[in-house]
Image (tube, rainbow, N blue to C red):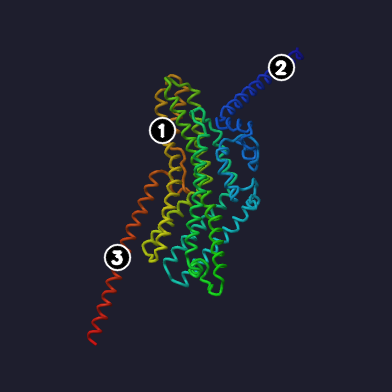
Amino acid sequence: MDANHDSNSINSSIAERRVKSSRVERVSTAKSERRLSIVSCSSLVARHLLANGKVQPEDVFSIEDNDPTNLTDHQDSGTLIVLKNLIWSMRILGLWPKPHPTFFGRLNPQGWVVFVYLHIYAVHNVINWLFTYYKYSDFTIFLENASMVIRTGATAVTFDLFYLKFLESIRSVKQLGGFPFEEGGICLMELKTPINIIVLASWIYLAMVLGFTSWSTATMGVQKFMDYYFYGFRVGHVNAVVMRFLMAGVWIAHIGITLTAEIFLKSFYVASCLLLGKTARAYNAMVSHLGEQDDLTGEEMNRVNKLHTQLTDLVHGVDKTFTIKAFIWISTIFLNLCIKIGIICIATDPSWVSNASLDIINYLVIFIVISLTAADVSLQCEVLLPLAHRLAAKADMKNLTVLYQAKLMIAKMSHPIAKLTGWKCFVLDRPFILTITGTILTYSVVLMQMSRSMAAQSNSKNMINGTNIVAKNNTI
C-alpha cells in the first residue's frame, strides 16, 4: 500500500511538472509572438532592402542590442536606414564615433583631428579674446570675439557630449524602429526624403558660408586680420602672399571643422526629433482608428496602454541623451543673437554690421528649425488626452477588465508624456519659441533706443564744445 501510494504521488508530481512546463512554454511562446508583433513596417522594408542588396550591411545596425557596444550587428533597423546619408556625412567629417566602450577608443583618425582642433581653437579664442580687448579696448572687437568664444566652446562641448553619449544616442534612436508604425498606417521610410533634404541643406549652407567668408577674408587687410584674430602680431615684414594663404587656411579649417561639427550635430538632433514625432503620430493614428470602432475589447485597451508606455519610454530616452546638448545650443543661439544685435547698434564699420546681420539670420533659421521639430513632438503628445477620453466613452463598462483598462488609460494620459527639454530648464514647445522671440525683440528695441539716446547726447556735447570753441575764438 505504501509503495503504491508513493508511486501515485510521484506520478502526480511528474504530471504537475509537465503541466507547469507546458504553461511556461505557452507563456514564452505568447511573449515571443508579442515581441515579433512589435516589428515595424520600417524594419520589414529594411529587411527587403538588405535582401536585394540595395543597402550594405555595414550601414545598418540592430534594433535589439544585447551588447551595447555591438553597433555592427547586421540586423534590420529602419531608423538607421532612414538616417543613412546623414550618418555617411558625419562619418566622413569625423563626427561619427567607432563602437567602443571608451571615449578615446571611439575616436577614428578624422575624429582625432576634429577633437584636437576644436579644443585648441577654443582655448586660442579665449586667449585672443582677452588679449585683443586689453590691447585695443574696442567694445565691438570684444563682442565679436566673445561670440566666437561662445560658438567654438559650445561646439567643442557638444562634440565631447555626443561621443560620450554615443551608445545611448544610438540605442534610443534604434528603439524607435521597434514601434509598430503599421498599426497607425504610417511607414517610417516616409522620413527618408525630409532627412535627406536636411543633409543637403547642411552641405549647401557650408558651401555658402565658405564662399562668403572667402570673400570677406580676401577683402580684409592682413594686419586687421591679425589684430582681430591673432593677438595683433606685426606682419609688416611678412610676404603678403604668404599671409593670404595663412588667412585662407585658417578660415577653411574653421569652416571645415568647427562649423561642420556644429551644423551636422544639430542636424542629427533634428532628424531624431523628426523620427520621434513620426512615432507619436503613428500612436495617435492607431488610437484614432480604434476610436472609430463601435466597441472596444479589453485586449485592445491593454494594447493602447502598453504602446503608451513604450512611447513614453522613447521620449524619455531621446530627451535623456540630447537634453544637455539642446540646452547648450539654445543658450548659444540666444547669447549670440544678443551679441550680434549689440554689434549692429554700436559698430561704426559697415563690414561689422553686414557680418552681424548675416549671423543673425543664420542663428534665427537654426533656432526655428531646432525648436519647431522638437515642439512638434510635444504637440503630438498633447493630442493624446482627448483621444483617450473618446476611447474610454466607447468602452464596455459592464466588463470589469475593459473598465479597468479604460480607467488606467485615462489616468496615464492625464499626465502629459515627457517632452523634449533643455537640461530640464525649459520645454521645447511652441510657447517657448514665442517667449524667446518676444525677449529678443524687446532686447533689440531697448538697445536701439539706448544707442540713439547715447548718440544724441554725444552730438549735443559736440555741439556745445564747438559753440564754446567759437565763443573763445571770438573773444580772442
The mark that comes first in sequence, 2 or 3, is 2
Using residue 357 as the reference point, say whether residue 235 is left or right of it.
Answer: right
Residue drawn at (65%, 21%) of the image: 20
Mark 2–mark 3 contact, CB under 8 Å?
no
Callout 3, which amino acid? Ser
Residue in front for this viewpoint, 116 or 470: 470
Q: Position of residue 35 (x, y in %)?
A: 59, 29
- Dot 3 falls on a residue whose secondary structure is helix
Q: Mark 2 vs mark 1: give the one in front.
A: 1
Mark 2–mark 1 contact, CB under 8 Å?
no
Callout 1, which amino acid? Leu
Quick check: can you spot residue 334? yes
Q: Mark 3 vs mark 1: give the one in front.
A: 3
- Dot 1 falls on a residue whose secondary structure is helix
* Real-space CA distance between mark 2 and mark 1, rounded to the nearest whole angstrom: 56 Å
Q: Quadrant of the N terminus?
A: top right
Q: Work out which residue is located at the far right of the displayed protein and give it.
A: 3
Mark 3–mark 1 contact, CB under 8 Å?
no
- Dot 2 falls on a residue whose secondary structure is helix
Residue drawn at (47%, 72%) of the image: 135
Residue in front for this viewpoint, 8 or 139: 139
Please say if 288 is above or below 458.
above
The residue under label 1 is 385
The residue under label 2 is 9
Q: Position of residue 236 (x, y in %)?
A: 53, 74
Q: Work out which residue is located at the far top of the displayed protein and give it.
A: 1
Quick check: can you spot residue 313? no
Residue in front for this viewpoint, 129 or 166: 129
The mark that comes first in sequence, 2 or 1, is 2
The residue under label 3 is 453
